[in-house]
Image: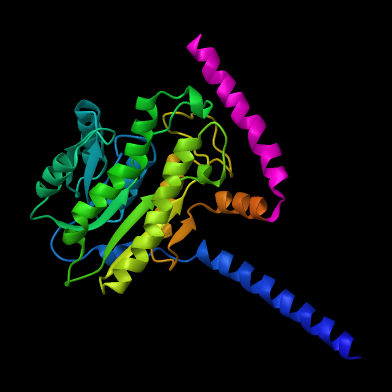
């Protein structure tokens, strides 16, 4: 009898736990975004790195749609100016500025100079989106310069830029937001070793900084957004699907996660479902799914180089 009651209680507890997890999951991806809490004061601005195209451009579009003026960062001045002109045509009541910096080689002094050029702007949002992927190939086939570039773009540059901007974002008159865009490649994807590792750095920085600013009493929301496979970006133009959204859909999901209360979150629901399945499965299943796909991509790149 006691054993029967024990197992019955365990069953109820397990069912309750699963139900609670399911409801929290649904709530996470259906709750309204809190991004507009960062629109206050005169002419609020958001800075988006890597905004010339892809997810960065799409995030800039989403923020402009929500009423932010947007500072666009990129490394190619001509491409950046084209993007700025396009956005000015799409958003007549929003201002746009541009900052040109090569994330793979910018010195700390150059970053500080770029930050100084933003003096006087009511900056309330920073989106560290810029990212650079190495060739899909074994680690030892990357050159030293390629590895340095990937680590600089994905880890060093966001850290240096965030450090330089923190005094502007730590303000008494209202809250501010730092959003760091990561990648599900940090789960253990082969042939993208340093890319995945540098994106993991970004997510670790997010969670550590989120706790740090709270400990310091600063009203800064820091959230790391993990991103899976996306189309309509430079390296991928395949048709979109539920599990491979467009850059604009991905950007909207990133903005929608603002205010979710988590330090790190999978931005898009389709990617969250994929990660949930991976987390439940034995590691060998993940390898069976990922390794053939990445080998195909590696072989495709090798054929292009012939």
Q: Quadrant of residue 124 in the image? A: bottom left
Colour scheme in use = rainbow
Please provide percent x and percent y for residue 212: 32, 67
Please provide percent x and percent y for residue 42: 13, 62
In the drawing, does residue 9 fall left or right of residue 266?
right
User: 260 or 128: which is nearer to us?
Assistant: 128
Q: Quadrant of residue 276 in the image? A: bottom right
In the drawing, does residue 24 fall left or right of residue 17?
left
Name the residue located 51 percent from the left edge and 34 percent from the top edge.
Answer: 192
Q: How many marks?
A: 0
Q: Mark yes or no: residue 248 visible.
A: no
Give the residue furthest to the bottom.
1
User: 212 or 29: which is nearer to us?
Assistant: 212
| Region in magenta | 280-306
Please provide percent x and percent y for residue 114: 14, 43
Q: Is residue 270 above or below residue 230?
A: below
Please provide percent x and percent y for residue 298: 56, 24
User: 304 or 77: which is nearer to us?
Assistant: 304
Q: Is residue 45 above or below residue 228?
A: below
Q: Quadrant of residue 99 in the image? A: top left
Q: Is residue 146 above or below residue 249?
A: above
């Amino acid at each position: 009898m006691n054993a029967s009651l024990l197992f019955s209680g365990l069953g109820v507890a397990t069912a309750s736990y699963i139900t609670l997890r399911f409801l929290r999951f649904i709530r996470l991806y259906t709750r309204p975004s809190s991004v507009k809490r960062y629109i206050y004061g005169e002419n609020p601005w958001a800075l988006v790195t890597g905004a010339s195209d892809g997810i960065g451009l799409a995030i800039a579009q989403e923020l402009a749609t929500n009423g932010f003026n947007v500072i666009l960062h990129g490394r190619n001045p001509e491409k950046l100016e084209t993007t700025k002109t396009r956005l000015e045509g799409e958003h007549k009541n929003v201002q746009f500025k541009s900052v040109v910096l090569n994330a793979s080689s910018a010195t700390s002094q150059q970053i500080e100079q770029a930050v100084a050029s933003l003096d006087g702007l009511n900056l309330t949002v920073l989106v560290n989106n810029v990212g650079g992927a190495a060739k899909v190939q074994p680690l030892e086939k990357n050159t030293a310069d390629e590895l340095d570039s990937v680590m600089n773009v994905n880890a060093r540059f966001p850290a240096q830029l965030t450090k330089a901007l923190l005094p502007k974002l730590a303000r008494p008159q209202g809250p501010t937001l730092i959003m760091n865009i990561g990648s599900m490649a940090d789960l253990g994807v082969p042939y993208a070793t340093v890319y995945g590792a540098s994106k993991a750095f970004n997510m670790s920085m997010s969670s550590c900084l989120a706790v740090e600013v709270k400990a310091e009493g600063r009203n800064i929301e820091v959230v790391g957004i993990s991103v899976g496979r996306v189309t309509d970006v430079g390296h991928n133009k395949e048709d979109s699907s539920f599990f491979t959204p467009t850059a604009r859909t991905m950007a909207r999901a990133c903005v929608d996660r603002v205010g979710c209360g988590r330090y790190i979150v999978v931005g898009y629901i389709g990617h969250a479902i994929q990660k949930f399945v991976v987390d439940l499965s034995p590691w060998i299943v993940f390898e069976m799914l990922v390794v053939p796909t990445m080998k195909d991509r590696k072989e495709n790149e090798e054929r292009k180089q012939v």
